[in-house]
Amino acid sequence: MFRLRLTVALFVLALALVGGGRADAAEPEGGLVALIGGEVRIGDGQVLSGATVILRDGRVEAVGKDVAVPPGARRVDCAGKIITPGLIDADSALGMSPADLSAKVPGADARAADAFDPWDARLRTALRQGVTTLHLGANREHLIGGVAAVVSTGSPGSAAIDADGALVINVSTRRSAAGLGGAARVALVRSTFISVDYGQVQRERWRRDLAEYEVKRFGASPLMEEELLLPPELLARMRLWTPTARAAWRVAAFKSMGRAKKYTKPKKPATPPKAPREDPSTDVIASTLPAPEAVLSDDGPKTSPKPKGAKARKAKPAKTRSKAERRTFFRAELAADVDGALGAVRDFRLEGVIVGGQGLRDRVQALGKANVAVVVSYVGDTAWSHSSPAARREEGLGAALADAGLRPALGTGATGVARFLRLHAAREVGEGMDPQDALAAITLWAAEAAGVADETGSIAVGKRGDVVVWSGDPLDAATRAERVFVAGQEVDLERD
Amino acid sequence: MNATERGARRRPSSHRRVRIAAAVVAAALVATPIVVRADDPADAADLVVRVGQLHTGDGKVLRDAVIVIEDGRFVSVTEGGAVPKGSAARVFANAVACPGFVDAVTQIGLDGGAAESPEALTPDVRAADAFDVRHRDLKPTVRAGTTSIGLLPAPVNVASGASAAAVLRADGSAEVLLRRGPPVFAFQPPALDNARVPSTAAGARAMLEAAFAGRAWTTSGEGSIPVRPAALEMLAAMKRGPSIVYADGPENARIAVQTLRAQGLSPTLVGLRSAWKDVARVADLRVPCIVVGLDPSDPIGLLEMPGKLAAAGVDVSFATGAPARSPRSLRLSVALAVANGFPTAQAVPAVTSRAAVALGVGDQVGRVAEGRRADLLILDGEPWELRSRVLLSLAGGRIVRDAAAEAEASK
């Protein structure tokens, strides 16, 4: 008996040992990785030397100098290496077909995410240079360019980080596909916003009228069907019932809840108010505007006190009004385009992002005062045209914008292929930008401009595990990306 | 005081007025030549610079280099930090210096057009003749660190014409250094075209070989144009020396190189933008190559080509091809090549001495060495890294950019 027990105990012990050994050897499901001893550039300007980054289940679990390596983690020695967040191209067209970039009649609801090919071979070349995330700016020809998207370059199966991003508006004068000059485009943008804004107010009025009608038609109660927390499918179905059936149902429902006393009987029938036209394109534009109640109640934009000093930066655009659901991404090339965009942002209280090149130079001060995010997008790295100087790359723009207190992001633009984003940042440094700012411009600030700073852009606890291990400073041409992690999983850089 | 006295007094005063006017004129006469001479590099301020690290341009690196500049030229270049007695050096202890860049392939300032067609042989066309020495693109070029440019006739004819080399001045003007530089040949469209004679590389070879021997090669076919005796004479007289050949792919490059080598002309290959799919065959030709106008959006294979050619022992240099591409993009080309495997040890020669040699002015520019034109760049890091900032740049001994002075001025 004793011997049997001993045997069983030994057997159990052996099983435990074997099992434990296996757990150590195998890659844990979802990934548990410890990047140990590297110089970690978090993305917000902070640098931690000799620090450890823990990635678990696709997210950053911990980062810091005194972080213990959890048991079972794959240990990666990063001594002498530099670790940064995955780089983010703040204005890209990579993986999108040219047809989608200039399609004839896109609606505001045309989504860049739908035009994106996550298996485009060029995505891998971008990934090999540490670019893990792209902000896709949808159509670049039409005034209303559609809905932008934020996608990952390294996970074709689930590329979209945000498929329902900003509304893209192309106010650039040089784009003449719609046969409109810059001033006409700005005017059209304004009238579009005005009509949609008006439509929003109309819709709000209709909602109130409908509620009134419902009370008249079916009888009033402190509790409506919606307040009974009925499933939406049932509510939808109930709208199709005859008035008699609904009235009967209400009486029964309220009786069963013991509230029959509070029920008032229906009065004479009335005609329901006419619903405004439903249009998904208008809905997208409407979602960039603050809610209509806010428009009716709010008495104008408030100004928040600005931090003093050249280097003081806004942490995030200050919220002076009820937040719009969606940001508006203005592509503006000339200074006049920038002014048009800034005017629309101010008048319609939009969450604006201004994307441009040379035109930004003359409006640096105005941008610094406005409540907008800014993206410097390269219309051409080696372009040199006398007929359209705006197509030339503007020197020292990153430094000028950062000095004005903005947090500029960098993008590679329509013809760019994202992969040498780090060299763009390096060039900004060569032209006067602070190196930490330049790294932020292709990580955290790019995530802010793309509206995904809660999700990625820095090595912070809880964010996506998009991390790159570099052989040296990522801004040096001679540096290589040695390891790239996308959502906590290491990417095989050798594979084609 | 009577009238006579008044008159007597008036006379000397009018004399005085004349004297003042004469003095003003004399002063102006004296002052004018000074202003004129200020443009002349020969009168450039003398300067002694000490720098932590110096890439001389031919691949060597000197530590604590002391560079003495007089009359727009390098007078001495020494290692070890000993500044000559009695002179005050500007010290850039942690900085890196290199020669001003040589952009070997450009058409800057050739807006008037440096080409003649439809003849196939136009060796007498000189790019220098079309060059505007005060063109508006020269200033951004010199500010970007380029101090010498190659001017190439457009490669629209098999024998396109003569290249030229120009040096840039700090004020944004230029001076032709070599008016009749290496001859330029083209073994690619549009010089080769089905509607022209010759239409193939083999035809171009036959035509050139005949011309080198002093004979006209014509066909009776459509598009055939008689060869001018002057063009024949000029080609027949080409015996030895450097030449420049545009070729798109490895096959045309091979035929061009064989043709020119047989005549004793040592070719440098330009273009090759579609040669990256077969780099080994280009490398086998054992000729220097100039890679023109790299852009981040180019295929990875093209960006990797300079590194692969260098690994095979080929002398590679870079050029912008301005104004088709930005004249400011030379450093970007180098950085892109370095990011794709081009050895950093060759990065400086690739945009200085090698390019100067290809243009036939290797003994005058492209190196920091005694007697050369004082074209110098001082940066706070390696020149092939885009993040490095220019601290001081000189063209012909004159200051183009001076970060310290600019910072002082903006205060």
Image (spheres, rainbow, N blue to C red):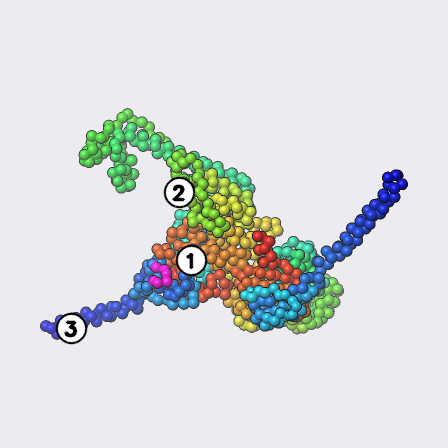
Q: Using residue B369 as the reference point, say whether residue A437 is left or right of it.
A: left
Residue A7 bears which disc, if any?
Answer: 3
Which tag is nearer the camera, tag 1 or tag 2?
1
Per the rendered image, the range of residues in magenta is A62-67
Q: Residue furthest top?
A: A268
Which tag is nearer the camera, tag 1 or tag 3?
1
Say if residue B122 shows up in the picture. Answer: no
Q: Is residue A149 magenta?
A: no
Residue type marked 3 = Thr
Chain of the residue where label 1 is placed in the rendered structure: A
Chain of the residue where label 3 is placed in the rendered structure: A
Residue B240 bears which disc, if any?
Answer: none
- Categorize mark 2 by other alpha carbons within 10 Å: few (<14), some (14-19), many (20+): some
Q: CA distance from mark 1 to mark 2?
A: 29 Å
Residue located 48% across and 51% down the image: A311
Q: Residue furthest bottom?
A: A3
Can you identify the residue that label 1 sits on? Answer: A46
- Assess whether mark 2 and mark 1 are in contact (beta carbons under 8 angstroms): no
Q: CA distance from mark 1 to mark 3?
A: 57 Å
Q: Is residue A66 magenta?
A: yes
Residue B385: horizontal and vertical position, in percent? 53, 63
Q: Using residue A392 as the reference point, say whether residue A495 is left or right of it.
A: left
Whether B44 is drawn above or below A235: the answer is: below
Residue type marked 2 = Lys
